[in-house]
Image (cartoon, coloured by chain):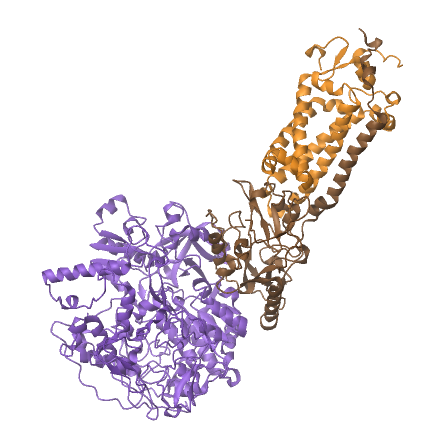
Chain colours: A orange, B brown, C purple
Amino acid sequence: MSHAEQAVPPGRILRYNFRERITHWAASISYIYLLLTGLAFWSPWLAWIAVILGGGQVSRMLHPWIGLIFVAAVMCMYSLWARQMHTTEADRKWWHSLKFYVQNEDDKMPPAGRYNAGQKSLFWSFFWAGLVLLASGLVLWLPEYIPWSLRWLRYIAVFLHPVAALVTIANFMIHIYMSVFAERGALDSMIHGDVSEHFVERYHPGWYKEIVGESSPPRK
Amino acid sequence: MSQATLRVQKISGHAGSIPGEDTQREYTVCKLIDTTTCIGCKACEVACMEWNDLPFGETIFGNSYQTMPETRWNYWNLILFNEHVREEDGSLMWLMRKNQCMHCAEPGCLAACPADGAIVQYTNGIVDFQQANCIGCGYCITGCPFDIPKMNPKNNRVFKCTLCTDRVSEGLEPACIKSCPTGCLHFGSKEDMLDLAGKRAKQLRDHSNFPHAGVYDPPGVGGTGVIYVLHDAAHPEIYSGLPKDPRVPWMVKLWKGPLKWLGNVAMVGGLIGLFVHYLRFGPKEREETIKEPHEGAQP
Amino acid sequence: MTNGWVDIKNTDMMLIMGGNPAENHPCGFKWAIEAKRNRNAKMIVVDPRFTRTASVADYFCQLRAGTDIAFLGGMIRYAIENERIAKDYLLNYTNAGFIVRDGFKLPEDEGVFSGFDAAKSSYDRSSWNYAGTLPATPPPAAAKPGQPPAAPPLPPMPEKVEYDQTLKNPNCVYQLLKKHYSRYTPEMVERVTGVSKEQFLKAADIFTSVRKDGDTKKVATIIYAVGWTQHSSGTQTIRTAAMLQLLMGNVGRAGGGVNALRGHSNIQGATDMAGIFDNLPGYLKVPTPADGNFEGWMKRITPKSAKPAQWDSFNYWSNAPKFGVSFLKAMYGDAATKQNDWAYDYLPKVDRNFSWVQLWDNMYNGIVKGMISFGMNGVAIGPNSRKNIDALKKADWLVVGEIYPDETSEFWKSPGISTDEMKKIQTTVYRLPCAGFAEKDGSFTNSARWLQWKNAALPMPGDCRLDQALVAQIFLKVRELYKKEGGKFPDPILNLTWNYTDPSNPSLSEVLKEINGKTFVDAEDPATKVQLKAGQQVPGFAWLKDDGSTSCGNWIYAGSFTEAGNLTMRRDAGDPSGMGVHQNWGWSWPANRRVLYNRASCDLNGKPWDPSRRQVWWNEAQQKWVGNDVPDFKADSKPSDHMGPFIMNPEGVGRIFAPLGALADGPFPTHYEPTESPVENLLHPKQTHNPIAKKFKSADDSYGTVKDGFNVVCTTYRLTEHYHYWTKNNPMNVQLVPEPFIEIAAEMADEMGIRGGEVLQVTSARGKYIAKAMVTKRIKKMTIDGKPVYQIGIPIHWGYRGIAEDEDKTAKTPVNSLSPSVIDPNAYTPEFKGFLVKVEKYVKA
């Protein structure tokens, strides 16, 4: 990834280039639609969501198409980020120290790279769940084309689709919480692309070291 | 095909109370199909098409007298033909089974349906699709153990036999029953039909070469609103794949039961957990901290 | 039907053979199911194919098409050998004890009865007579000048027939019967029919079990349709069934009888109303030139009773002159007088065969120049459709009244005719738009002889006309021409009664009223003192007179439209006896009785054989026959009079032996192979085929043999889903069965290496048929005399006009392009079933 792609103000570091940002938002907007319509199908108590979104028929009609967009976006993400998402020794340590992360004691955390282990897990969850959703979704989309003798495919699909969706929902909730509420600047980074050096240094010291070339300054 | 005179006792995808539950004194209706006197004349197929004004479709020759391989969204009543060789004596049986919605007491389609009021069960037991409410998800197709609901690809809604709710609600028998020339079809209360079917099965056991004759009213779906008298009740599958022990697929049950609870608990729990986390720990860094530039970051 | 549809519910045993009622009469078949459901009746189905009827039968045998007499003959033998016969019935109600004259010879090894003239292929039937003194016969009337000399008339029957109540006399009918069918052993049945000995014995045992251990209570019925009639020995097949039923005492009884299932809603009515060329309405024989005059005609058709001296015989046909005069009065009204022999001369005289196949042959040979074709599709009906098409090419004109364009009205479009050839066809075709059945009123006479009125359900579309309007308008025009131009003999046309309110569109009510007949003078029935005023409708045929004081268009329909109104409209479903008599539903000929010969349902003393199924009985107090049904008998004939129950026969009894002119090809049925058959006749190899069945000799007629490669037996039939050749125009029916097919045995398909859906070409000596194969287990490979024989089946319903045909989805080959022009010598029915073909994979040219 070249830093010259996009000019960033002084003191700031480009975290997500344009391709990454557009891919992310394609995935996230489609996902939110899928989530909302999916929830409407999930429970009669949430059926009102579909009403707001144009009715059950429209929701059911668009859901699979939007699903295709979502999976396509996830696949783009894969091509963009997969190489950076390999689990490292540091990630394993990170998981061991999860307690500190949860308690906002980030300084007790082992230094994370561009993506910490949690983010990597988010990535892989969405990737694999996306594939499961795609496969099961296709079966659910076109049940008439599944011959009666292969009806077990439909039974599996009807179960796996919500299971995979629930996996994404869990990850999604944490992701939103982290990016919007917990880590100030994270949301901004996905809009403008850049983050403060402080942000990088604080949350991704490994990456900071990589791009700034020096060890992180001593903390206060 | 909503009928004002029919009240709903079960309803799909519905939050809250059910409009017709416990509001009516009514018996469960039932169609009896005596396969041992069915002659495969297809009068019921025609009557169904005519009464319901179903559009004609193209059919192709399929090495059989059967009109088409399976029911269609616009063909709800189909006699299935099977040439079966009896194991006992090698004699041939030409089995004909009128296939249509079985109107299960515990309908898998209704259980699987997420759309509010798209599938209802009336207090008389008829399971009816309300196409106006159907969202076209096709889950009913998956939920049905008899492969009955079919999607109309043009309007993306699912159709099947209504047991002629419009006739039954007016005190008439379904069109297929009316048309049956041999009287192999009967219609009445479930109790009466079970009685009639039982007697016929006994007659077959006592006076014909069918020692295993019996009644098909599968308990796995709570019994059905369409019951069969079979020459060989021990092997319903010889009747072009009538399932021996039909049940709502357990995956569907798992999904609509435990998974749903688990998911709801997880989602609500997760939201609460995150909120509590925020209250307890707040953001990782306060606004003001972030604003203060780090000297080390100065170029 | 001797009995009726509803009556089938009273039976204990059904033999369904040569018919497929589940498919072709599904509504009537409910009564067969009722019998199974309510009486535990057994059903045996014998057919070349495992049909939908077979699917609900208790026992099924697959036999080779055209071998029914062999099977039934075996049944007769089985019944005799095992004493499963109704002894008292047989002795008193049949001619079993009658002695047959010396000189009569059974076919035995020769294969022909006595009197056969091989050169003329015909019989001198005078030896087929009972023993007894023959009455003197006057010399035959001299032939009129210009007419061929008539064949010498058959001798009459003896008035006092010799008989032997012990049935021991070797020349008595019973002994001859026993001897004749002694050759029809189970082994022989197996060799001829392909039904294994075990299967045959099982079927025979089940069927005759109603007479097990001398039981006289149970009843068996035999149900058949055109699977029996459409053979070169069709009439004799039905005779065999009648004989078996007489032997077992099943005729005249509720739940018994010999029951023909008619293939159309009104075929019975058509037959009753002179649908056959040699009949007038009510089965009066048409006059021939040899009759000379009215008296001669009546003499020929009015039999004298012929019976054992101690017995009585009603001999109902002795009333023929009353029916004949009343018929002529109905036809010609005041123009028919005693002085002019009741206008006898107006009636056409039949001097030759004018049956269906003969008519087409005549057209083919340029004798018939034009044809008016209503309510039928002659090309598709066949047989030998190609010949019929070629015949129409030679006609000057053709008028077709139809509701769809059909194979006949578009014969010139039949496949294989090039545009150039089409241009050369000079036939002028007029197509008249007719009304469909639901657009017409009128009565249907069903198989049970019930006349049931129907109302028009729909208005006619466009410019359609009622059949009677079209016919009337043609008639009025012809009459006008005769009026204007005179002509050779205008009298029959000018004097024809045509007193309808709207002469150009007669109402069918008026027509039925006319058929029923009326009296021209005041009349009184001496027995009941019932009075009729001049001009009133007659209440029944007993009122008809031979003095010209009554008219009646069809004596058997007298009573259908009386002063009480149109009784065919009655719809009272009440059935007090519970025996399906429904006395006030519609109207049944004759005289509203529902089971014919019902006197035979009682023993000699007039008590029902089965008290639980009481039809009629002798009421000692009233000194007359009474019952739930109308007694088919002389009401006051005491049982001690020993009057025979079969009142239409001069003998008064049922004919196990059919004497003299009753049948053309033998007094006992004997098995003849179909005209085209894969084997020689195993019973008498010297005479393989029916010696007097007529084959035709035109260039379009040829007959195949196994030697020519035609080695597969083909039979044709109808499907439930279609009705003849016109539902192929109805999208609903087309959806049910979209295209033609050929049913073949799975073994045959394996041998040929073909699968269901692959296209086959079936070729006979006359034409070819192309359609997809339906490979099925329902037709099995057969072993005939040790050799493998395959049968195939083809439904008849397609041709070259229809929805699938017009969309080029079929090969457009009418199935009757295959069938041969061969006719049964009695009813002249073509042999549509059991002819030879070869079957190949179709290779597109």
C192 or C578: which is nearer to us? C578
User: For this view, does C612 lie left or right of residue A165?
Assistant: left
Q: Position of residue B156 (x, y in %)?
A: 55, 40
Q: Relative to the observer, which residue lies in front, C620 or C367?
A: C620
Residue C670 visible: no
B18 to the left or right of C147 = right
B185 in relation to C740, above or below? below
Q: Specify the farthest residue to the top.
A: B299
Q: Is residue C17 visible?
A: yes
Residue A84: percent from left, percent from top: 75, 22
On-image quarter of the C terminus of chain B: top right
Q: Quadrant of residue B31?
A: bottom right
Please tell me whether residue C208 is drawn above or below residue C458 in the rendered image. below
Q: Which residue is rendered at x = 67% and y = 33% of the image?
A: A36
**How far across and down, in percent of the image, does residue B182 sit?**
50, 65
Image position of C426 (left or right of A3): left
Q: Position of residue A151 (x, y in %)?
A: 63, 46
- Give the number of marks: 0
